[in-house]
Every structure is written in structure tokens, then in C-alpha cells.
Image (cartoon, grey):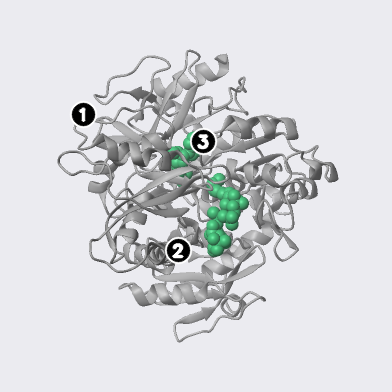
Amino acid sequence: MGIAYDEVYRHSIADPRGFWGEAAGLIDWTTTPSVVLDDARPPFYRWFADGELNTCANALDRHVDAGHGDRIALIHDSAVTGVVTRFTYAELREAVSLFAGVLSAQGVSAGDRVIIYLPMVPEAMIAMLACARIGAVHSVVFGGFAPEELAARIDDAKPHVVITASCGIEGRRIIEYKPMVDEALRIASHEPVSTIVLQRPQVQAQMGDRDIDWHEAMSTSQHIAPVTVRATDPLYILYTSGTTGRPKGIVRDNGGHAVALAWSMRHVYDIGPGDVWWAASDVGWVVGHSYIVYAPLIVGATTVMFEGKPVGTPDAGAFWRVISDHGVKGLFTAPTAIRAIKKEDPQGALLGDYDMSSLEALFLAGERLDPDTYYWATRMLDVPVVDNWWQTETGWPIAANLRGLDPMPIKPGSPTVAVPGFAVRIVDDAGVDVPENVDGAIVIDLPLPPGTLPTLWGDDERYVASYLSTFPGCYTTGDGGYRDEDGYLFVMGRTDDVINVAGHRLSTGSIEAVVASHPAVAECAVIGVHDPLKGQLPRAFVVRKAGVEMDDETIHSQIKAAVRERIGAIASLKDVVTVQALPKTRSGKILRRTMRAIADGRDEPAPSTIEDPAVLERIAPLLRSTQ
Ligand code: COA
Ligand code: AMP
């Protein structure tokens, strides 16, 4: 293990106040915190409790004020429209402070929520930063979610305004966003005062009484200066799949978040002022929040925002073109994007067309990095391919190879070591630490470091029940894995119902709720099965109700359509399989955990309480099959 890493890690765990108190110096405060960690009310911990700051000022104003206004802050590269737009720090501040004026004119003030449902356009970043500027709490909803999911988020967050666009562009298809927002608002019980609509040239959205045109509003708006907020005030809510189907509103505070991102950008990703950095994700996911928007700007780097796909816009060389055109030093994406490129261009023939000399490392996260993908990317790009493991809840990596602190040898299949601040342990069902190389639940001792979730939006109880109750004193990650003799972590998969489809996190529980509502379905189980491109895909197993006259094919296609319509295209079922029975315990509980273990290729014996082992044997090949 690296000596520098070892020392820093030990310091962060033994003396979190000293460690993070020092790291707080990486950002600008309006009131410097004197209380680094408030632990008066465990299991609720608050970082930098009496500090005050503005996150947007840290991302923009301080760089402009320091004389770097001409440095490029954002390169928006839209492969789907062929347009590249650059904003200097001064220009981005101008746009953000003006849009803050638009929000303010709509009556949005500190603490109010704003829902952002936008494609990958610069306005998504502008809207987020404008909220931060006035202390409003944004909640970005990924464009691939259907109106019903958007409505659930509107009802939970109760936004003052909703921001959307006339359309997104998916490959060659135009997806109209505004009608989806209208439909979501029809379903939701909460009514925002207005919807701000960005009209894109590809589609003109129909405007109603409460709709406001983005450009018109900007043309008459006034600039707004950053307001001071408390470090512990919420910066954003990001909904993620919960095990019950009701999305969980992950809360991010201002102070801890800014400090953690500044620290991680430098020490994990080795990115600093003026470096060109590209996180090829979507602003609707946590990677987009942390590493497209906030972290690169907080450290004064240039962030690339890409509208397009790794393949098909126009071909599998799209990523290499962006790296070469903009001189990208670090690329961050999901393994699935690399698998998609590998599938189209296995020999890397398209790489030869581009100058890749600026690239120093490829970072991959969002799902397990399978060794095949690791070896292929390493061979093709000839740079370190760095796995890092984290979650929406943590907001930044729990385990990584710290490129800016102490780069370590890479072991394929491992995100390397616990990041300073995260006291990671592997435990058995009783919460006892397991020996090296033995699988267990991955937990983190409390307090979690700055930047991680302080609670769930409006639901302290659910926060405790979901994360802090299984192993008292610890945060349960929901992932299982082991640590080897060198201290390297191996994250093998979820122990709950969360699955990862093309780097998108979904709950099989919420898909099951839709499948179960079909009138022909008596009972069902949705399990993530292996897919060579997307990592996992949901497969539904259904038992028919007796006496229903519909044929299987019709039932299956109706179920598939219902999932797309009610959750979104990203949750599309791989297939629906009718079975005579689902494996159960004698008390009638469906053996989902055992089914998941078989699908993941894990060797987990069926419980002794199984009702009929033959049912499990019949279903096992269907769980393993990728066809
Ligand atoms: N708005 C509207 N629809 C969207 C959407 C969005 N923002 N994102 C995805 N969709 C739709 C797609 O058009 C597709 O619809 P279809 O079934 O009608 O074709 C469906 O949702 C599934 O999308 P996806 O899972 O992304 O599959 P894909 O075949 O379009 O692309 C990959 C596959 C691997 C290329 C793509 O998923 C990818 O680039 N993944 C990287 C993921 C990532 O960045 N994750 C973040 C963590 S780092
Ligand atoms: P999300 O909240 O969408 O970021 O998804 C988080 C989940 O994705 C984690 O709990 C893991 O199951 C999985 N995940 C993310 N990164 C990795 C990684 N590097 N290795 C293995 N699993 C990962």
C-alpha cells in the first residue's frame, strides 16, 4: 500500500475534525466554520455546522474575481446537433446570475425547490448553478424517466417552478420533453407557480398560461449576486431508486459537498485549475452533479458537457473525437459506454483518426468494471484505467485509486482502496468483520465524511431505516464484496433489489409494482440478469392468474409497454417469462435473494425453508441465460 495514502487515510479516520478542518481551506467561506463536525445528535452528523458560503460563488465568482474570467469554464459539445459552444468563467457567471434573476422574478427564494427536467444542454448547468446562487434547492430529474416518475418527484419535492425544454435529442430521434412535463403536472397533486421552457430549434413546445419562455425571461432579467447560506443548508435533492419503489430524495448540503468535491477532484482525479476534464454522464445522475457541474468548476478546471452517445453520434469514434478536439486530460464514464464502443469497433480502428495524446487517465464508475472491459480499454488507450466505486448517496468515491495523492498498482476487478474519510468494513450478517478474501456486506462506520447524504428529503426516519438500522453505528452501502490481503476492495454487486442497467440505477421493486398491476398477473418477480452490453437488464417472471383468457404474447407485450410508459425507456424489460410457479419459502415468501444470487453467478445455497426445490431448479437456467 502506498505510504502517502496510508498516512493520509489514517489521519482522516483517526482525526476527522483535523483532516476536514484543513481541507475546508480549499474553498471560500463567507463565515469560516469553527465547528468542523457537529456530532451532538447521532446518527445525524453535520459538517462545518457554523460555516457559511455560497456554492455558486465557489464555482464561478471566485475564479473571475481572481482574474481568471477569460479561462474556459464549459465546453458544450453537442454531437447530435454538430454545435460546440464555449463559455468562459465570466460568461458562465453572466448567464447564471441572469437566470438567477429569472428565478427570483418567479418568486423563488432560498430554501424553495426547483425541478429541472432538461436534456444535456448548457442551460441545465446554468439552471443548477442559478439555484445554488440564490440558495434554492434544485432537483434534477433524468430525462429518460416517464411522466409518472417525474410526478412522484414533483409531489415529494413540491417545487416552486419546473424548468424544462421543448425537446431532447436521442441519436437521430427527437424526444419531446414539454408534453411529458404537462402530463406529469396533470398527474401530480402539487402545482408549481410556473414552468420555464427552453425552446430548442428542433421543436417548438406548445405554451400554456403558466409557461414562461427561457429566452424571453432572460432578455428582461436582472443579475443577482450570490446569497450566503449555511454550510448545512441543502444544495440539492437527487432522487434515486429505493427498495420499496418510492424514490428516495438524497439530500446534499452546501459546505461538506464543496469541500469533498474540491478534495476529491485534486486527490482522486488529479484535476486542477485549467485542466480539461470530461465526465461523460448525464446531469440527471450523481456523476453529472458532482463531476460535470460542481467539482470541475470549484477547482477552476474546464468541464466538457457532451450531448450524444458513445456510439451512433455519429460512430464509435465519438468519444475519441471529443478528447482530441478539446485536449481532454481525464475522461470519466461508465463501463457500459466502453463496452458499447468495443462492440462497434473491437480493434479500435477509429482511434487512429484522433490525437489522444492529452489523455492521462480513464475513470470508470457506475457499475462493476468487468476485467474484459478493463483490459480492452487499457490496451486501446494506453493510459491507467481507474475504477472507482460510489453511490448517489455518497456523492463522491468511497473507493478509488488516488491518482493525485498516491497512484497505486491497479488490480483488475477492484476499485483499489477506501478513500480517506470512508471507514470501510466488510461484515457478516451479525455485523462482525470477516477475514480477508471472504465476502460480506460492505458498510462504513459513522460519521460518513463531508459531502455524503445527511438525510433523506423530509424523511429522517426513512434515512435511518434504510441505511443505518441493519448494522448500528454503520452506514449500509447495499453492496457486497471483499477485501484482499493487500487491502484492495472488490465490490461484487448489490445485496438488495437495486440493479444497474447501462450505468443507470433502477429498483426491481418499482418495476415489479408495474408488472404486478397487469390484470393477468397473479404474482411476479423482476430480477436483473446479465447482459453483455448493459451489464444488467431486468427480466420479469410472471405467474398467470387462473381463468384469464389472454394469450402469453399479448400479456408480455402489454407488460413491456406498461413499464416503458410508467417508469421510462431506460427501464425497458429484456423480456417477460411466464412460469408455472415462483420459488418460495414454506411461509410463501418469494426467494428473490436466492434468484438474484443465481443471476449474479454467486454461489449462495437456497434457504432450508424452501417450499419446493424443483421450482428453483426449473427457473435457474432462465436466471443465468443472457438470451
Ligand atoms: N431522455 C429520453 N430518453 C432517454 C434518455 C434521455 N435522457 N436517455 C436514454 N433514453 C432512452 C433511450 O433513447 C432508449 O430508448 P429506446 O429503448 O426507445 O431506444 C432507452 O432510454 C434506453 O437507453 P440506454 O439504456 O441509454 O440505451 P441506449 O441503447 O440508448 O445506449 C449506451 C446504450 C450504453 C450507449 C448508453 O446507455 C450509455 O452511454 N451509457 C452510459 C451511462 C452513463 O453515462 N451513466 C452514468 C453513470 S457514469
Ligand atoms: P448510483 O447511485 O446510480 O451511482 O449507483 C450506485 C451503485 O452502483 C452502487 O451501490 C454499486 O452497486 C454500483 N457501482 C457504482 N460504481 C461501481 C464500481 N466501481 N464497482 C462496482 N459497482 C459499482
185 sits to left or right of 582 = right
Residue 279 can be seen, yes or no = yes
Q: Distance between the residues labelled 2 and 1?
A: 37 Å
Disc 1 target residue: 608
Tell me where residue 415 appears, x and y as whole percent.
53, 29
Q: Which of 615 and 443 is in front in this view?
A: 615
Who comes first in sequence, dot 2 or dot 3? 3
Secondary structure at numbered mark 3:
loop
Secondary structure at numbered mark 2:
helix
* Three-letter residue code for mark 3: Arg
Disc 3 target residue: 368
Q: Does the residue labelled 2 lie within 8 Å of ligand 1?
A: yes
Disc 2 target residue: 564
315 sits to left or right of 278 = right
353 sits to left or right of 602 = right
Label 1: how many Cα within 10 Å (few below 14, some 14–19, many 20+): few
Q: Is mark 3 within 8 Å of ligand 2?
A: yes
Tell me where residue 623 appears, x and y as whole percent.
41, 41
* Three-letter residue code for mark 2: Arg
Q: Nearer the viewer, residue 443 or 277?
A: 443
Q: Residue at x 45, y 31 (%)?
A: 492
- Residue 369 lies, with reference to residue 72, above or below; the image says above
- Residue 530 lies, with reference to residue 177, above or below; the image says above
Within the image, what quadrant is residue 565 found in? Answer: bottom left
How many labels sit on residues?
A: 3
- Residue 440 lies, with reference to residue 58, above or below; the image says above
Residue contact at pointers 2 and 1, CB within 8 angstroms: no
